[in-house]
Image: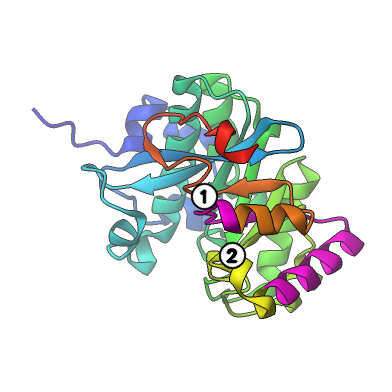
Amino acid sequence: MTDPRTYLERFFEGTLADVGGCVRCRNAQAWHGELRMAFQPIVDVAQQEVFACEALVRGPAGEPAGAVLAKVTDDQLYGFDQTCRVLAIDTAQRLGLRSRLSINFLPNAVYEPQTCIRLTLAAAHKVGFDPHRLVFEMTETEKIRDPNHALSIVRDYQSRGFLTAIDDFGAGYSGLNLLADFQPQLVKLDMALVRDIDRHPARQAIVAGVMGTCAALGVQVVAEGVETRAEYEQLRTMGLTLFQGYLVARPALEALPEPDWPALV
């Protein structure tokens, strides 16, 4: 017989209500769909180590993130976001992850940062995952409804010792304004800037400008979506050391893929 409880109810085994949260958290629509997690490493080639693994949501049969997100309504945002966080932590710990864990979060799904973080912390405590190894990625492609509220979330996360990142930088709504306002620890270049950068002087100039700005702000830059050796070599020549993409390793469903270190020598 199929268990009618949500994943969060099953995970917390009857103690979900004890975790707490603001009134809107408690009244939010639960997410009843089944989800799985894939993982893709972000490597530091200077240190020859895995800097973090990004958790990527998938459907029950491994459907891509876009197909999953297309089914999420506004009323389900909070429940979906919380489910993804807990599932990512639970799965990463079960797989024996030792690096940082990078989780995508939806600013529009967070009501009160101090209370909405409670499930995340409770999940980490339950499975024995060190919460200081968490990285929270906020994508630039999501239209942020209330920038001041989003800023309060980032500040709260940073005060707790979490690393924060702007994902898909250069592809979305706010560009450099988002960087200036939020000043995260990490910026992940959008793959459109990375694609064929070895053959596009304009992209090289733009990325060099972003790198200079980030260096002045003390922000690390990650090149994501790196697929070819030529892209990698161009970016290494420009001084980048953090990489993510098919050249490093493809996402693996409920597994921690080993980086292809020989391709990065």
Which residue bears the numbered disc 1? 245
Q: Amino acid at mark 1?
A: Gly
Identify the image quadrant of the N terminus.
Answer: top left
Instruction: Report x, y in % for residue 153.
Output: 68, 58
Determine which of the numbered discs, if any, sits on residue 194 in the image.
2
Residue at disc 1, secondary structure: loop
* Residue at point 45%, 38% (across, down): 39
User: Seen from this angle, which residue lies furthest left?
Assistant: 1
Any magenta on residue 219? yes
> Alpha carbon of mark 2 to alpha carbon of mark 1: how far?
10 Å
Instruction: Report x, y in % for residue 237.
Output: 76, 55
- In this view, the residue in front, 41 or 19, is 41
**Residue 80 drawn above or below residue 17:** below
**Which numbered disc, 2 or 1, marks the residue that appears first in the sequence?**
2
Q: Amino acid at mark 2?
A: Val
Instruction: Report x, y in % for residue 16.
Output: 43, 34
**Residue 231 drawn above or below residue 171:** above
Q: Which residues are magenta?
A: 204-230
Q: Are marks 2 and 1 in contact (CB under 8 Å)?
A: yes
- In this view, the residue in front, 227 or 38, is 227
Any magenta on residue 112? no
Instruction: Report x, y in % for residue 259.
Output: 53, 33
* Residue at point 36%, 59% (across, down): 76
